[in-house]
Amino acid sequence: MNNKKGIAILGSTGSIGTQALDVIRNHKDKFEIIVLTAENNSDLLIRQAKEFKPDSVVIGNKEKYKEVSEALKDDFIKVFAGKDALNQIVEHSAVEIVLTAMVGYSGLIPTINAIKAKKNIALANKETLVVAGELINKLVHENQVQIIPVDSEHSAIFQCLVGEIDNKIENIYLTASGGPFREKNIEDLINVTALQALNHPIWNMGAKISIDSASMINKGFEAIEAKWLFDLKPEQIEIIVHPQSIIHSIVQFEDGSMKAQMGLPDMRLPIQYAFSYPNRIKSNFNRFSFSDYANLTFEPANSKKFRNLAISFDAMKKGGNVPCIMNAANEIAVDAFLNNKINFLNISDIIEQTIDKVDYKTNLTIEDYIYYNNYARDIANQLINNNLNK
Ligand code: MG
């Protein structure tokens, strides 16, 4: 037996996954990769497997099984493929922490399985809580596991709450960089291109979350994520635009005192903290320099310009299946926007109209979430096709 923490990375070839491996590369004495999974990028998965020697790898796309298993046949690494394998691999007995870094709704079922297998979750897939926060919290409680947020804002709040167990939160301020379109007028947003939306001023991220940041639905998702992680009411959550992205979020307590967590925007910091928690370990990440930042500025978020903010808060208040429908419609709309089928402002139209067309339901089971996710996708696709035929 060794005393390294065993880690599974779901989505190891994406932006969060590769940064997580960078953290582990620098702390091989503390962490050990047990499982790596990727949806499609077999080349990178093979290279990662050869470097980190996990017990098992899973490639989501079954057509790439042969390529991956042949490449790793001399490395004594078990290779699996397909959705069922992705969902089950998290139960591996040597895994202590599962980093959920896959894209969108696909994170839900593996995360549920990991919680049921009593693994702690380093949560990078916020859609899991957006879609099914109520159910996830129930499972977390039943299985006595912990969710440690990786999202930088939620990691900030989590860090601010260390040592504050009995102290109530009055408010949280979720900071937002404002994305690439912060200074644009609403009239300009109709013409922005996918390429412009992908070009985030601060964070270098995958395509889906870059569009979500540009449309600000990412911040709406983060508000819902915060609600479930920290047991908050919608009126306790405020979005503050902070373009420098140095303050990662703020907690205000009942005495009016505010605690903020600060640092250069570098996702490796919250990833490392999720792995090392409750300890902090040394890093060589760049340090903040006061001479580089004469001003830290703040402005209110504009939910008229970014309608997705208003839609998200509304979905949070309604609860039930509405956030699940919103997420599904957004995934379809973002894909359509990336493929130049709809314009940027249509993303909000599609989400709103999809929510309108699906019946409201509360007290959802896993099967209900799966059903409403699929149903909302169908509706969103129909809306996009109708829009095109006009
Ligand atoms: Mg974030």
Image (cartoon, helix red, strand yellow):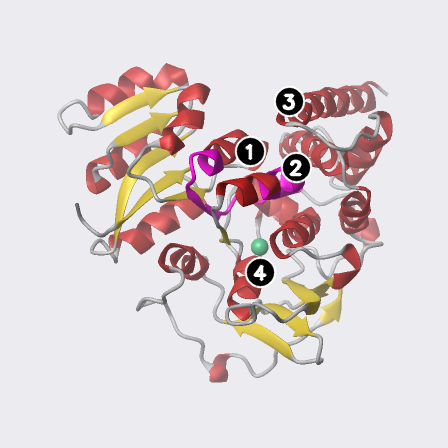
- Res. 131 mark: 2
Are dots 1 and 4 in contact, CB under 8 Å? no
Q: Position of residue 176 (x, y in %)?
A: 65, 61
Label 2 to label 4: alpha-carbon separation: 19 Å
Quarter of the image for the C terminus: give it. top right
Say if disc 2 is inside 8 Å of ligand 1.
Answer: no
Quarter of the image for the N terminus: give it. top left
Q: Is residue 222 above or below residue 252?
A: above
**As shown in the figure, which amino acid type bears the numbered disc 4?**
Glu
**As shown in the figure, which amino acid type bears the numbered disc 1?**
Leu
Badge nearest the viewer, 2 or 3: 3
**Dot 3, how many residues are within 10 Å of its Cα: few (below 14), some (14-19), or many (20+)?**
few
**As shown in the figure, which amino acid type bears the numbered disc 3?**
Glu
Q: Is residue 84 above or below residue 283?
A: above
Give me the residue at 69% from left, 73% from top.
298
- Res. 108 mark: 1
Q: Is residue 167 above or below residue 135?
A: below
Reading the image, the residue beneath label 3 is 367
Label 1 to label 2: alpha-carbon separation: 8 Å
Q: Which residues are magenta?
A: 114-137
Reading the image, the residue beneath label 4 is 153
Are dots 1 and 2 in contact, CB under 8 Å? yes
Q: Dot 3: what SS?
A: helix
Badge nearest the viewer, 1 or 3: 3
- Res. 269 mark: none
Q: Dot 1: what SS?
A: helix
Label 1 to label 4: alpha-carbon separation: 21 Å
* Ligand 1 location (quadrant): bottom right
Residue 288 part of the magenta segment: no
Lower position in the chain sequence, tag 1 or tag 2: 1
Are dots 2 and 3 in contact, CB under 8 Å? no
